Amino acid sequence: MVNYKELGLVNTKEMFAKALKGGYAVPAFNFNNLEQLQAIVTAAATEKSPVILQVSKGARNYANGTILRYLGMAAVEYAKELGWEKPQIVLHLDHGDSFELCKDCIDNGFSSVMIDGSHLPYEENVALTKKVVDYAHQYGVTVEGELGVLAGVEDEVSADHHTYTNPEEVIDFATRTGCDSLAISIGTSHGAYKFTPEQCTRNAEGKLVPPPLAFDVLEGVMQKFEKQGGFPIVLHGSSSVPEEYVEMCNTYGGKLPNAIGIPESELTKASKSAVCKINIDSDSRLAFTGAVRKHFAEHPDHFDPRQYCGDARKEMVKMYTHKIVNVLGSKGKAE
Ligand code: G3H
Ligand code: 13P
Ligand code: ZN
């Protein structure tokens, strides 16, 4: 058993309390490899932003869970080396799908886990989340639960879509499970194609404009938690799919037609509310791929991964820094 405290990591408790009060959101960036981790830590350490390093089940399958865990542990020491005296770094399991997987992460140095029972019938979601919380809290590990199902691109995205989180359920869920934060569904979705062109309108230049997020649902959830002084809310699927990276990919041989994300202005608006954690993965994939495609096109003679992965890392540092400074408002919140 390795407890996260021995590794210099922190859980989300105080981090979210400060974010809730301060009107900003903590970035939760997924990582699958060394370059993504280096770029995340560089941006967070430079900007003194609290940060959540997320490992998904897919990342564990790709890179090996043990390797990612050690990379997560290395993050704290690397941050200190970069001059961040008191790093505020969480190592978090993203979309844990079983008690056993969450337990394995808790026993091996993670400071936070998500148990995603959002696809289960309500009572089963409550029971599974409570089981994880009861185990995690013995070790000071914080737990994110989820209510409501994120829209897939195949779904109808409309204000009354039945998979949005039902505000009537949130108090019961949070009280009975004891979870520390709650992921909700208000119209975001995973990946680089968050809306179909049919779900969007077009602006004067003919560019796709996505439908707005269901801020009324977020408002409804926040109102329910008002009496207890608020509760940390999490947004998944919050990449903005920057046009610049989609274009970079497409200019240099890629094919990502009609890729579209969540406008940054909506993420900033959410960050100022009870939304304390915003999940971003696809934007890192796009920055990485765009930079690598450009590098290959401009340097067809290069074959050293340090050359093109170096470019990708630089681009990702730029992207992460932009999110911290200009979108989520977390710059300087972990001095
Ligand atoms: O929630 C989805 C994240 O972007 C992780 O994606 O399961 O492909 O690693 P992944
Ligand atoms: P994106 O695909 O929008 O980056 O969402 C990532 C996410 O929610 C990870 O859990
Ligand atoms: Zn997610």
Image (cartoon, rainbow, N blue to C red):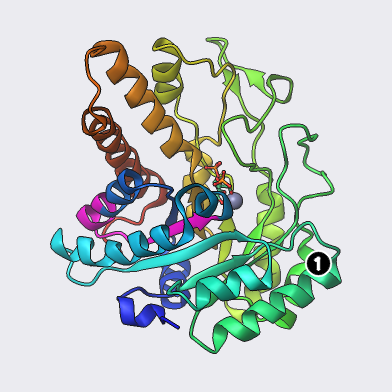
Q: Residue at x 76, y 51 (%)?
A: 164
Q: Residue at x 22, y 34 (%)?
A: 306
Q: Residue at x 63, y 60 (%)?
A: 183
**Position of 307 relative to 149 (above/below):** above
Q: Which residues are magenta?
A: 42-56
Residue 8: x percent and y percent?
30, 76
Q: Residue at x 56, y 49 (%)?
A: 58
Residue 60: x percent and y percent?
51, 54
Label 1 Cα neighbours within 10 Å, binned few <14 / some 14-19 / many ≥20 = few
Report which quarter residue 144 is drawn in: bottom right
Residue 333 shown in magenta: no
Q: 9 or 236, which is in the foreground?
A: 9
Q: Which residue is mark 1?
A: 168
The answer to whether 46 appears left or right of 110 in the picture is left
Identify which amino acid the numbered label 1 is placed on.
Glu
Q: 310 or 277, which is in the foreground?
A: 310
**Position of 152 relative to 145 (above/below):** above
Report which quarter residue 129 is drawn in: bottom right
Report which quarter residue 313 is drawn in: top left
Residue 238: x percent and y percent?
54, 44
The answer to whether 68 appears left or right of 42 in the picture is right
